[in-house]
Image: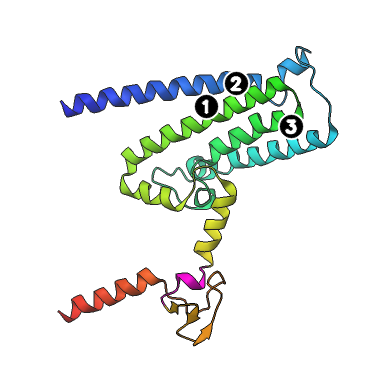
Amino acid sequence: MQFSERRRLNIKQSSRIGFLFFIAGVLSVLGFPFNPLVIFKVVEPTNIEVLWYVGWIFWAAGIALIILPYYHFYYRKVNVLVDSGIYAVVRHPLYLGWILSIFVATIFLYPHWLFVIIGFSGISSVYLISREEDRLNIEKFGNNYKKYMEKVPRMNLLLGVMRLLRRRFPNHEDCANFENGRCKSHNIAVNPKGIACPRFTRKNKKAETKTSNIEKEN
């Protein structure tokens, strides 16, 4: 009974993802930067040169985000949970690239109310696809993916970069030697948000070391 229920839910989820991909695909054709609606003069958007350049910047950034993941999945042929490279910044770089290179870029390239509607509808569709994929990945990778979700944002590039830098360059407040605005190791006042010194010891790591030592003594 449990197997049948799980299978039914998987089929339902697959159908939902398929429907969202269909909607996003149709909107992608209508919102493509080399736009058929503009080429055949169905729509005549306002020509604003500054926005045109901004649009192509978004397009280039989106294409870069689409290309980067292929290193892991086609060149390295990875079949496990990937949390390095671009995947250390955002969980869904392909979908973020899709949004930027088509829906966001087109809004700037062709300023027109129709492309704003298409753009926001497409962004919503791709966002919902990414949520469904998160659910599938939780089923596939379990707690490892949940921990990954806590560490890396879905598609917020700026937040992802900030979190990555914080992991690479931890702050004083993350150090086991930091207490009440002072570094106990150097006995000086420090900025909690400042980059930690070479003697940095992560709080959790120190607690784990103490626990390990107590277990050895016992």
Contact between labelled residues 1 and 3, with CB atoms less than 8 Å apart:
no
- Would you name the residue on which mark 3 appears? 108
- Would you name the residue on which mark 2 appears? 27
Question: Where the C terminus falls, by quadrant?
Answer: bottom left
Q: Residue at x 76, y 18 (%)?
A: 38
Contact between labelled residues 2 and 3, with CB atoms less than 8 Å apart:
no
- Image coordinates for residue 152, horizontal then vertical, percent: 47, 50
Contact between labelled residues 1 and 2, with CB atoms less than 8 Å apart:
yes
Image vertical order of residue 177 relative to residue 79, above or below: below
Q: Secondary structure at mark 2?
A: helix
How did the renderer colour the structure? Answer: rainbow
Whichever of labels 3 and 2 marks the residue nearer the N terminus, that label is 2
Tag 1: amino acid: Ser
> Callout 1: few (<14), some (14-19), or many (20+) C-alpha neighbours within 10 Å?
many
**Front residue of this view, candidates 78 and 10:** 10
Q: Residue at x 55, y 69 (%)?
A: 193
Tag 2: amino acid: Leu
Tag 3: amino acid: Phe
Say left or right for 103 vs 21. right
Magenta-tinted stretch: 170-176
- Would you name the residue on which mark 1 appears? 125
Whichever of labels 3 and 1 marks the residue nearer the N terminus, that label is 3
Say left or right for 48 vs 12. right
For the residues marked 3 and 1, what is the alpha-carbon distance in whole angstroms? 19 Å
- Image coordinates for residue 110, horizontal then vertical, percent: 76, 26
For the residues marked 3 and 2, what is the alpha-carbon distance in whole angstroms? 16 Å
Residue 152 highlighted magenta (yes or no): no
**Front residue of this view, candidates 138 and 71:** 138
Q: Residue at x 47, y 35 (%)?
A: 130
Q: Secondary structure at mark 3?
A: helix
> Callout 3: few (<14), some (14-19), or many (20+) C-alpha neighbours within 10 Å?
many
